Structure formats: structure tokens, C-alpha cells
């Protein structure tokens, strides 16, 4: 029974931490959440206007908050001590704000162009091209998730983060497929069940995104280490 209650306690603590971090993340995204809720009930006439305002806010609101969320999740996964969830979140928010905004501006422009292009061409895309387009969309979703992970895991600039995150997503297709599938599945489920995002959705996506990112990084490091050892033996 002690083992059972211990397991239940750890599970409840895990879920509570996820829910609490998700609540903090939503709070810091309050302006974006407000506009998204208006998008659900607005008519088509005002939709473009609200979308434009939301897109302008994303780099300054959503990206810093999500980067901080990934930073907290990183500490959980690598078992690094923190000084409290809210304090750690706020510290990471301030620390990475400039990088998050800079990368956010680029990614918002990129995703805006990608989605507008899709909306204009959806009627003319054939089956095979549509599949390729969806596969590339999955790759870019993972690239975005890895960008957040890279910012909080490495002390590098924004260009290096964007470039290396994309290379990591391309070079590890299994991890990329897992991250993209999770994001797409959660997005699809959330269309009719908004409570998923409100409860643990953001934390769950960040956890899985950084987990696969960390596994890919560790695998890359091991491969590089083996290659260095092999070159050393050959030179000897």
C-alpha cells in the first residue's frame, strides 16, 4: 500500500505541477488568449482584423511566455533545481525575452506566409503535393518547438538557434514525426475541447517537445563522440 500511495502521490504532484505551469503560461498569454476567444465568436468581417492584431502580439507575448515554459520544463527533465515555479518562470522570461521576440518575429512572418500560401493553393493542390505540404508543415512545427528548446538549452544567438533547430529536426525524422503528431493531435482535439489547452495542453506539448529535443541532442553528441574516437584510432 505504501508503494501504491507513493505512486499516486507522485502522479498527483506531477499533474499539479503541469496544471500550475499551464495556468502561469496562460496568464502571461492573456492578451493573445483574449483575442483568440474573440476569433471564435466573431464574424468573417472582423476576423482578418483580429488575426492581424493577434499576429502582431505573438512575438511580444506568446513567444517569451512559451520560451519560459520550455525553460521550466527543461529543468524538470534534466533534474536541475529551481527556486519555485513562478520565480523560475519569471526569471527565464526576462532572461530570454529579447531572443524570443527576435525569433518570434521571424517565425510569425514565416508561418503567416506559409498558411496564407496554403489557404490560396488548397483548392489546386493534388493528393501527392498535399501530402508533401503536410509533411513539411509537420517538420516546421517541430522546428518551432525545437527553437524554444534550443533557446533555453544553449547559450547561442537567434540565428544559430533557428538554423540548428531546423537541422536537428531534419536529421531526426522519428523524433520530428512524434513531436509534429502530438502537436497536430492536440490542436485537433482542442478545437472542440478547449479545456485541454486550459488545463495541461501547453505544459504537455512543451514537455514532449523538449523531451524529444533533448533525446536528439544526446544522440547527436554520442554520434559525434564515436566519430572523434574513430578518427583518433585511425590517426594512431
Image: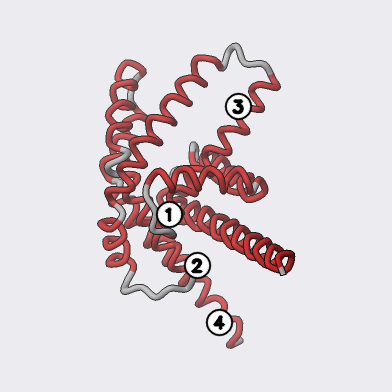
| Tag 1 residue | 199
Closest to the camera, between mark 3 and mark 4, is 3
* 190 or 80, nearer to the observer: 80
| Tag 4 residue | 5
Q: CA distance from mark 1 to mark 4?
A: 24 Å
Q: Position of residue 72 (x, y in %)?
A: 39, 63
Residue appearing at x 40%, y 58% in the figure? 152
Q: CA distance from mark 3 to mark 2?
A: 33 Å
Is 176 located above or below residue 225 in the figure? above
Mark 1 or mark 4: which comes first in sequence?
4
* 154 or 72, nearer to the observer: 154
Q: Residues within 10 Å of mark 1 (few under 14, many from 20)?
A: some
Q: Position of residue 217 (x, y in %)?
A: 56, 58
Residue appearing at x 56%, y 44% in the figure? 167
Mark 1 or mark 2: which comes first in sequence?
2
| Tag 3 residue | 133
* 36 or 146, nearer to the observer: 146
Is 150 located above or below residue 102 in the figure? below
Amino acid at each position: 500500500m505504501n508503494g501504491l500511495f507513493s505512486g499516486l502521490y507522485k502522479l498527483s504532484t506531477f499533474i499539479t505541477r503541469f496544471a500550475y505551469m499551464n495556468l502561469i503560461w496562460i496568464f502571461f498569454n492573456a492578451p493573445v488568449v483574449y483575442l483568440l476567444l474573440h476569433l471564435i465568436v466573431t464574424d468573417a468581417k472582423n476576423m482578418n482584423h483580429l488575426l492581424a492584431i493577434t499576429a502582431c502580439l505573438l512575438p511580444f507575448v506568446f513567444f517569451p511566455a512559451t520560451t519560459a515554459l520550455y525553460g521550466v520544463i527543461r529543468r524538470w527533465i534534466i533534474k536541475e533545481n529551481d527556486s519555485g515555479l513562478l520565480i523560475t518562470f519569471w526569471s527565464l522570461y526576462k532572461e530570454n525575452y529579447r531572443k524570443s521576440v527576435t525569433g518570434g518575429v521571424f517565425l510569425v512572418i514565416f508561418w503567416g506566409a506559409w498558411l496564407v500560401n496554403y489557404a490560396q493553393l488548397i483548392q489546386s493542390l493534388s493528393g501527392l503535393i498535399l501530402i508533401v505540404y503536410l509533411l513539411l508543415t509537420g517538420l516546421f512545427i517541430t522546428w518551432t518547438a525545437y527553437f524554444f528548446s534550443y533557446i533555453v538549452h544553449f547559450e547561442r544567438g537567434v540565428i544559430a538557434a533557428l538554423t540548428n533547430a531546423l537541422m536537428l529536426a531534419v536529421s531526426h525524422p522519428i523524433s520530428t514525426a512524434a513531436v509534429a503528431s502530438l502537436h497536430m493531435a492536440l490542436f485537433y482535439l482542442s478545437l472542440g475541447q478547449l479545456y485541454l489547452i486550459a488545463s495541461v495542453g501547453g505544459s504537455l506539448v512543451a514537455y514532449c517537445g523538449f523531451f524529444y529535443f533533448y533525446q536528439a541532442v544526446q544522440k547527436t553528441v554520442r554520434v559525434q563522440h564515436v566519430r572523434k574516437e574513430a578518427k583518433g584510432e585511425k590517426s594512431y
